[in-house]
Amino acid sequence: MSIVLAGQEFRIASGADEEYIRRLEADLNRRVREAKAKYPGETNSRAVLLAMFEMEDELKVLSKEVSSVDRKIEELKRVRTGEARTEDAPVKRPFERRKPVGVR
């Protein structure tokens, strides 16, 4: 299969669906066009590098967010299985309150 990235043609072999590959191709070309619009004096290859830099930044931010969500899920699982106290739960139910000291 052939794709065109930033004006250059590449032949690739992939087990992925062709529609998926075409979406990747279109997304990368869009990002390169955006980089060229932001930095009009840059060459095509430098615009590609700027687009890659922005994509790597997005990847790092999303990876950090996914890790945070994974930690919260694990904490909730521990609360559910009784491995942690509900007072330590990362998420409280809307009407959950601590009982005043001395009240049973």
Image (tube, rainbow, N blue to C red):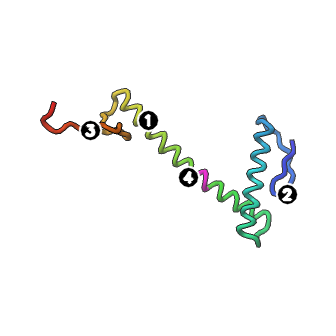
Q: Which residue is mark 4?
A: 61
- In this figure, which residue is indicated by the disc labeled 3? 97
Residue nearest the observer in this picture, 26 or 83 = 26
User: The N terminus is located in which quarter?
Assistant: top right
Q: Position of residue 36 (x, y in %)?
A: 75, 65
Local secondary structure at mark 1: helix
Q: Amino acid at mark 4?
A: Val
Mark before the other along the chain sequence, 1 or 4: 4
x, y percentage for residue 46? 75, 65
Tell me which residue sits at (82%, 39%) in the image: 13
Q: Quadrant of the rendered structure where residue 41 is?
A: bottom right
**Which of the marked residues, 2 or 3, is nearer the chain's N terminus?**
2
Q: Which residue is mark 1?
A: 74
Q: Which residues are magenta?
A: 57-61
Q: Circle 3 sits in a helix, a strand or a loop, which is it?
A: loop
Q: Residue at x 12, y 35 (%)?
A: 102
Residue placed under numbered mark 2 in the picture: 7
Report how far apart the C-alphas of labels 4 and 2 lie in the structure. Answer: 29 Å
